[in-house]
């Protein structure tokens, strides 16, 4: 037991399940340590480059960590208070925006009463929607309060403001020591194999996180400039912050940003032409990032199927919330690397012609097909 590939993969999956359960139970206490070591992993390649310039480790750490800390403090001090003010204003004005939206819908329905009657639809949309008005307002207030809660939670966890930088600094100083200690715990016969495996996982995970941090910051900046400077859309800063956060969630983040932009433009009373311009402009920005910038910075595909990615997003969000959704894809890609080492058939290419053969067999029995008529006049049989 434990030597064949199937046993090893079962042991690995059981261990990973146990680790996931422990993380889910103690997530609130573990999260600052996860953030700190993730930041250390992202900054360590920069420190290694500085060391190649013959700088001592502590000098390289001081330079990299000081620049990162100063930039974070400047961005947080400038953006967070303004975004918080805009979010509170949106929450206070949400009821008025909803009334205005219902009035505009009602006016459109009255102007197109004949068309609506021919389609057997209610002529007064306000009557049809008023019964759901409280539910719509409650849902909108819930979304806004969630954004406020996000900023409030960040502000309330003041201890994290000190704890995360301190942990990150210690992790950066002794990053190589931690890595060497983990490898030292591995038996000598397997040490090189584990080191190679750690290297592959590190390249996938750290490269993804570092590239994602850069891309999300650029998405937020581009969205803020587009909506605030060019279109003068209200609450542009809140949308830009949300865009930077939501773009980190693969598959669904960009579409959520587009829906938010259209909803805010519509509720703030802009005409249809303006809404379409805003929609297509933001869509163009996101497509440029999706098709051009993100593959170059993040590194293209992480090597997992979209179904696997969506499953990882669902599980990560259910267990760990937004941080779990952000980390779901790189963790899934890292697990694929580990599982492929113990069970190579998971990642190695299939033999030529095998996909068609297995697809024709299928998982369920198929109805027999009739043979084509025999050219000599014989009756066709069943196969």
Image (cartoon, rainbow, N blue to C red):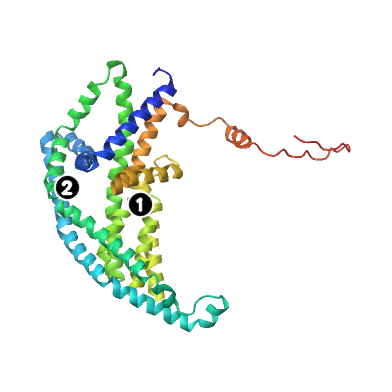
Q: Residue 293, labelled with which disc?
A: 1
Neighbor class of circle 2 (other Cα within 10 Å; few <14, some 14-19, many 20+) is some
Name the spot of residue 319 as percent of width and height, x first.
32, 43
Front residue (pair 143, 342): 143
Position of 37 compared to 256: left or right?
left
Front residue (pair 147, 260): 147
Answer whether residue 269 is visible to the viewer in this image: no
| Residue drawn at 14 percent across, 39 percent down | 167
| Residue drawn at 39 percent across, 66 percent down | 279
Q: Residue 68, labelled with which disc?
A: 2
Q: Quadrant of residue 107?
A: bottom left
Front residue (pair 102, 73): 102
| Residue drawn at 38 percent across, 63 percent down | 259
Name the spot of residue 297 as percent of width and height, x first.
33, 47
Answer whether residue 191 is visible to the viewer in this image: yes
Q: Classify mark 2: helix, strand or loop.
A: helix
Name the spot of residue 317 as percent of width and height, x first.
34, 47
Position of 51 compared to 142: left or right?
left
Q: Residue 280, labelled with which disc?
A: none
Position of 361 compared to 55: left or right?
right
Disc 2/disc 1 C-alpha distance (Å)? 22 Å
């Amino acid at each position: 037991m434990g030597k064949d590939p199937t046993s090893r993969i079962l042991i690995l999956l059981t261990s990973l399940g146990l680790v996931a359960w422990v993380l889910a139970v103690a997530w609130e206490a573990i999260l600052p340590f996860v953030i700190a070591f993730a930041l250390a992993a992202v900054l360590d390649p920069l420190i290694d480059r500085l060391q190649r310039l013959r700088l001592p480790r502590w000098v390289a750490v001081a330079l990299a960590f000081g620049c990162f800390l100063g930039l974070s403090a400047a961005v947080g001090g400038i953006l967070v208070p303004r975004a918080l003010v805009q979010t509170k204003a949106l929450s206070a004005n949400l009821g008025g925006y909803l009334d205005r939206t219902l009035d505009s819908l009602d006016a459109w329905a009255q102007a197109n009463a004949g068309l609506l009657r021919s389609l057997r639809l209610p002529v007064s949309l306000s009557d049809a929607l008023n019964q759901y008005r409280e539910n719509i307002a409650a849902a909108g207030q819930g979304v806004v309060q969630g954004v406020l809660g996000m900023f409030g939670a960040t502000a309330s966890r003041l201890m994290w403001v000190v704890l995360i930088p301190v942990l990150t600094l210690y992790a950066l100083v002794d990053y190589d020591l931690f890595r060497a200690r983990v490898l030292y715990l591995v038996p000598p016969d397997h040490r090189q194999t584990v080191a190679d495996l750690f290297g592959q996982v590190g390249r996938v995970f750290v490269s993804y996180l570092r590239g994602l941090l850069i891309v999300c910051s650029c998405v937020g900046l581009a969205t803020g400039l587009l909506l605030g400077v060019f279109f003068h859309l209200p609450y542009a800063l809140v949308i830009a912050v949300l865009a930077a956060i939501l773009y980190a969630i693969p598959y669904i983040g960009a579409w959520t940003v587009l829906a938010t932009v259209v909803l805010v433009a519509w509720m703030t009373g802009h005409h249809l032409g303006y809404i379409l311009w805003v929609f297509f402009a933001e869509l163009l920005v996101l497509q440029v990032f999706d098709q051009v910038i993100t593959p170059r910075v993040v590194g293209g595909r992480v090597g997992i199927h979209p179904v696997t990615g969506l499953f990882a997003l669902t599980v990560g969000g259910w267990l760990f919330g937004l941080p779990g959704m952000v980390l779901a894809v790189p963790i899934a890609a890292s697990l694929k690397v580990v599982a492929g080492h113990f069970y190579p058939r998971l990642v190695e290419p299939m033999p030529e012609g095998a996909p068609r053969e297995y697809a024709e067999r299928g998982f369920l029995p198929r109805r027999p097909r009739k043979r084509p008529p025999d050219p000599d006049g014989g009756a066709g049989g069943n196969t």
